Image (tube, helix red, strand yellow):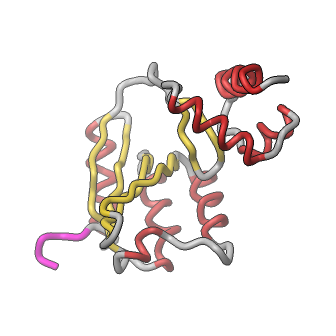
Amino acid sequence: MNAAERRTKITHLLTQADGPLSATTLAAQCGVSRQIIVGDVALLRAGGLAVLATPRGYVLENTSAPAHTERRVVCRHGDDRLHEELYTVVDLGGALIDVTVEHSVYGQICAPLHIFSRYDADVFCKKIQTPDACLLCGLTGGIHLHTLRAPDQATLDRVVQGLKDKGFLLSDDK
């Protein structure tokens, strides 16, 4: 299979997938290395395909998703409270779409999270425990932004209040 055929196959596999597909999984299906897949995905993105990289693998951005409400919040916590923060959001019906930090050299760094459930939270927390991984908020004394998503405003308000009640939100008086 040549490179164009491989990228067509990757697009098809992502379109048909029920969830994220890792670069390793795509590599096995295409008979190439993981690094070749990473390059192919970069080329597909450059060509306009909306491929998102999540902690669990690649997904196509769902442009036909049902309506939802989003809000950015500023949070602060140490590594020891990560699991609690993630569970608070998903248990109250929300999702964590991304995390953003302000870096002194690079400026704003934003990374997709796509955490919609406790399962997603557990997978993310397990990955962050590996020796070569660190949280972005570790660069900023625990301060970071999240884009939160919920199906409606009432749910989003409940999620924000839950984060506030547990002391995760950075307030104006701190």
In the picture provided, is 135 more to the left or to the right than 56? left
Question: Most prominent secondary structure in the magenta stretch?
Answer: loop
Extreme residue toward the left, this view: 173
Residue 90 vs 170, above or below: the answer is above
Figure quadrant of the C terminus: bottom left
Nearer to us in this view, 63 or 108: 108
Figure quadrant of the N terminus: top right
Extreme residue toward the front, this view: 2
Residue 43 in the image, given as x and y percentages of width and height? 59, 33
Q: Residue at x 32, y 59 (%)?
A: 108
Residue 84 in the image, given as x and y percentages of width and height? 48, 68
Residue 172 among magenta residues: yes
Stretch of the chain drawn in magenta: 170-174
Residue 77 in the image, given as x and y percentages of width and height? 38, 76
Nearer to us in this view, 156 or 18: 18
Q: Residue at x 43, y 79 (%)?
A: 78
In the picture provided, is 66 more to the left or to the right than 33? left
